[in-house]
Image: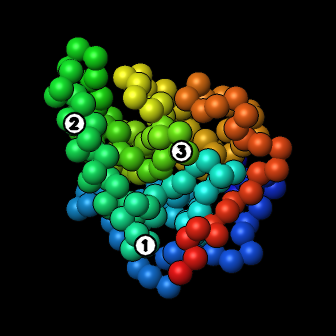
Amino acid sequence: MSFKDLNNILPLPKYTYETGSNAKWPSIDDSYSFPMDYIEFITKYGIGRIDNFLTLFNPFIDNDDWNFFKQKEWIISDFSELNESDPDYYSFILYPESNGLLPIGITGNGDYVFWVVSSANSDLWNIAVIASRSPDVEYHQMNLVSFIEGILSKKIKSMCFPKDFPSSNILFDNSDFKL
């Protein structure tokens, strides 16, 4: 999968916001850097919603609702509380554990998209999706950009996403994120 394939399905926006193009990319923490496909996606698209449904968190935006680092902290805390509140129902393996889930995005329905942190090399991380209020984890053996391209091209299906996603007119909308 290449960015050209993705760009054919998801046209680049006319204007971009929070691309990190003039900034040094931070590390996720002392151990991990961001995967290169994610860096390329954010650099080209910035912050916005994919087909008015999926938003990837961004390390450069100041808004806590979309900031990668704030969301990472809050979502891992929330999922840890779920694990503790009902360990027979919820048994999520969370970052920083081996094969732990690291949140990277959210849908309009409240579903979460995660990286599966399985290696010191972040470029080898796969994707997981958890539907809102579900104990089940759906795994996809591919990187983030391949997952997005696969979902948008309908080559892969996510049981977590609605049947009408993606729409017939896929856009990257960043109008809510203008500075």
Q: Which mark is residue 60?
A: 1
Up-down: is 106 above or below 68? above
Up-down: is 142 above or below 41? above
Q: Secondary structure at mark 3?
A: strand
Percent across and percent down for residue 169 are: 82, 50
Q: CA distance from mark 2 to mark 1?
A: 26 Å
Up-down: is 20 above or below 65? below
Q: Residue at x 55, y 70 (%)?
A: 177
Amino acid under disc 3: Thr
Tag 3 near tag 1, CB within 8 Å: no
Query: Colour mode?
Result: rainbow
Disc 3: which residue: 107
Percent across and percent down for residue 70 are: 31, 60
Percent across and percent down for residue 12 are: 73, 66
Amino acid under disc 2: Ser
Q: CA distance from mark 3 to mark 1?
A: 20 Å
Q: Which mark is residue 122?
A: none
In terms of sequence position, does the residue under pointer 2 or pointer 1 come before the other? 1
Q: Residue at x 64, y 31 (%)?
A: 162
Taking the view exactly as shown, the residue that stands out farthest to the top is: 88
Is 122 in front, or is 90? 90
Amino acid under disc 1: Phe
Q: Secondary structure at mark 2?
A: helix
Q: Quadrant of residue 40?
A: bottom right
Q: Residue at x 51, y 55 (%)?
A: 56
Left or right placement of residue 101 versus residue 7 in this view: left
Is 171 in front, or is 9? 171
Q: Closer to us: mark 3 or mark 1?
A: 3
Left or right placement of residue 152 versus residue 66 in this view: right
Disc 2: which residue: 80
Q: Is any atom of residue 170 visible in this view?
A: yes
